[in-house]
């Protein structure tokens, strides 16, 4: 039977999680001898204090900051400098503060402002210097941007923007992502919980600070079990567009929806009870509900056949496209200024804004798709095939997208990946 000392050893070992280790009965451990050693070490030589040195300090804009509170936090106590910043027109960008934006200042021991550096919202650098006789000078200059590539992935739980926010993707990239896949996915109706996406995009940095985003270089979207993948390619003439791996244009001849985010309130039918006319009649289009003022986009390249007011349509735009195709956009609150009879529009251009003019009981867009002037259901009609890369250029394209395809493959192999920007 173990002695009390041995029971103590067993309990201690159990509490510390040690296994396959024990002490033999009657084992004693030798005390290891120790010796105290003291040694005097020479102190390193201190650098002499330079009274003329300029010391920089960085502060980040906080919500609710004024330029006064920001500079006070940075140690600036200089009434003359504040007067200059209030009155000099070149220094005006300092009063357009965004939370998180850094401001670098140099002050002397008395809190006098010696210099200031600030990246403006316009993307250039504001530099302020104290010169001879305490005179300040402000100037703005272009900065050299460092463009890095970022890979991020997300999974749909409720919405595209919710998933993008969770993945740390900026809103500008999310909007561009929706635009890239607009020919294949209706982001209001087609998304399903569990859909996944990956995106490779550019981020712009100045002095190590992010100042904005650039282009999407590659992206993929797994929607309802189907994997869509696109790549940005610049042809020898300098034209940029998105294409699939096979070389087909990622943007179909027609977008699936005339608005980025909306909901259908009335579909295409031959018998619908009209809420205003109080009778049964055909509804030869699709109604998309959205707040008044929501942008409406052209679903394909074309020429404006009519833009103005017409009967029950209210403010309406008729666009003729290649071949026998045409589209109609009705009940608009207003029409974009450049959209006039005979004007050319490009796919995705904002041509008007949602309203409730004409025979409408609430703000929505009435959208029609016609072939040879016969209305067809835009949700089920077979749309024209998109263009493809010329066969002689296809090998060059496929070679160029290999690194991007590898990045997307990496994103798929790392669920929930959010990889840092790289050079």
Image: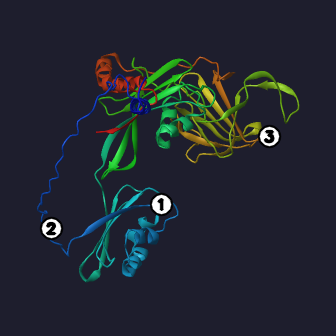
Residue at disc 1, secondary structure:
loop
Residue sticking out furthest to the right: 278
71 to the left or right of 106: right
| Quadrant of residue 140 within the rendered picture | bottom left
**Residue 62 badge:** 1
* Mark 3 or mark 2: whose residue is earlier in sequence: 2
Residues at discs 1 and 2 in contact (Cβ within 8 Å): no
Q: Is residue 86 above or below residue 6?
A: below
Say which of 384 and 371 sits in front.
Answer: 384
Residue 38 in the image, given as x and y percentages of width and height: 14, 57
Residue 385 visible in the shown view: no
Residue 110 in the image, given as x and y percentages of width and height: 31, 79
At 42% from the left and 66% from the top, the residue drawn is: 94
The residue identified by callout 2 is: 47
* Mark 1 or mark 2: whose residue is earlier in sequence: 2
At 40% from the left and 77% from the top, the residue drawn is: 82
The residue identified by callout 3 is: 361
Q: If the image is split into quadrants, where does the C terminus sit?
A: top left
Residue sticking out furthest to the bottom: 133
Q: Is residue 104 above or below residue 136?
A: above
Label 1 and label 3: CA atoms lie apart by 45 Å
Residue 373 in the image, given as x and y percentages of width and height: 66, 23
Residue 110 visible in the shown view: yes
């Amino acid at each position: 039977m173990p002695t009390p000392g041995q029971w103590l050893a067993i309990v201690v070992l159990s509490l510390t999680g040690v296994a396959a280790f024990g002490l033999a009965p009657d084992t004693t451990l030798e005390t290891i001898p120790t010796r105290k050693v003291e040694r005097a070490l020479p102190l390193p030589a201190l650098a002499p204090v330079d009274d003329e040195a300029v010391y920089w300090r960085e502060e980040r804009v906080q919500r609710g900051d004024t330029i006064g509170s920001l500079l006070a936090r940075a140690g600036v106590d200089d009434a003359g400098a504040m007067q200059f910043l209030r009155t000099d027109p070149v220094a005006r960008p300092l009063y357009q503060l965004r939370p998180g934006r850094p401001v670098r200042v140099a002050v002397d021991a008395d809190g006098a402002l010696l210099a200031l550096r600030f990246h403006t919202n316009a993307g250039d650098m504001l530099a302020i210097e104290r010169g001879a006789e305490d005179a300040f000078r402000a100037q703005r200059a272009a900065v050299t941007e460092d463009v890095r590539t970022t890979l991020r992935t997300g999974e749909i739980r409720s919405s595209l923007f919710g998933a993008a926010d969770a993945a740390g993707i900026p809103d500008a990239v999310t909007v561009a992502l929706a635009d890239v896949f607009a020919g294949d996915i209706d982001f209001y109706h087609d998304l399903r919980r569990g859909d996944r996406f990956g995106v490779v995009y550019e981020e712009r940095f100045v002095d190590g600070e992010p100042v904005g985003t650039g282009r999407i270089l590659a992206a993929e979207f797994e929607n309802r079990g189907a994997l869509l993948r696109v790549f940005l390619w610049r042809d020898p003439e300098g034209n940029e567009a998105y294409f699939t791996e096979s070389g087909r244009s990622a943007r179909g001849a027609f977008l699936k929806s005339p608005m980025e985010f909306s909901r259908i309130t009335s579909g295409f039918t031959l018998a619908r009870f009209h809420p205003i006319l109080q009778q049964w009649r055909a509804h030869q289009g699709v109604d998309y509900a959205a707040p008044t003022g929501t942008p409406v986009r052209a679903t394909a390249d074309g020429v404006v056949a009519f833009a103005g007011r017409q009967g029950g349509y209210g403010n309406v735009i008729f666009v003729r496209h290649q071949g026998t195709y045409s589209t109609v956009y009705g009940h608009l609150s207003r029409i974009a200024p450049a959209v006039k009879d005979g004007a050319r529009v490009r796919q995705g251009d904002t041509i008007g804004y949602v309203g409730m003019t004409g025979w409408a009981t609430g703000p929505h867009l009435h959208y029609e798709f016609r072939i040879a002037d016969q209305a067809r259901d835009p949700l089920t009609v077979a749309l024209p095939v998109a263009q493809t890369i010329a066969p002689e250029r296809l090998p060059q394209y496929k070679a160029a997208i290999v690194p991007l395809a590898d990045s997307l493959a990496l994103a798929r192999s790392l669920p929930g990946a959010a990889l840092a920007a790289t050079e």
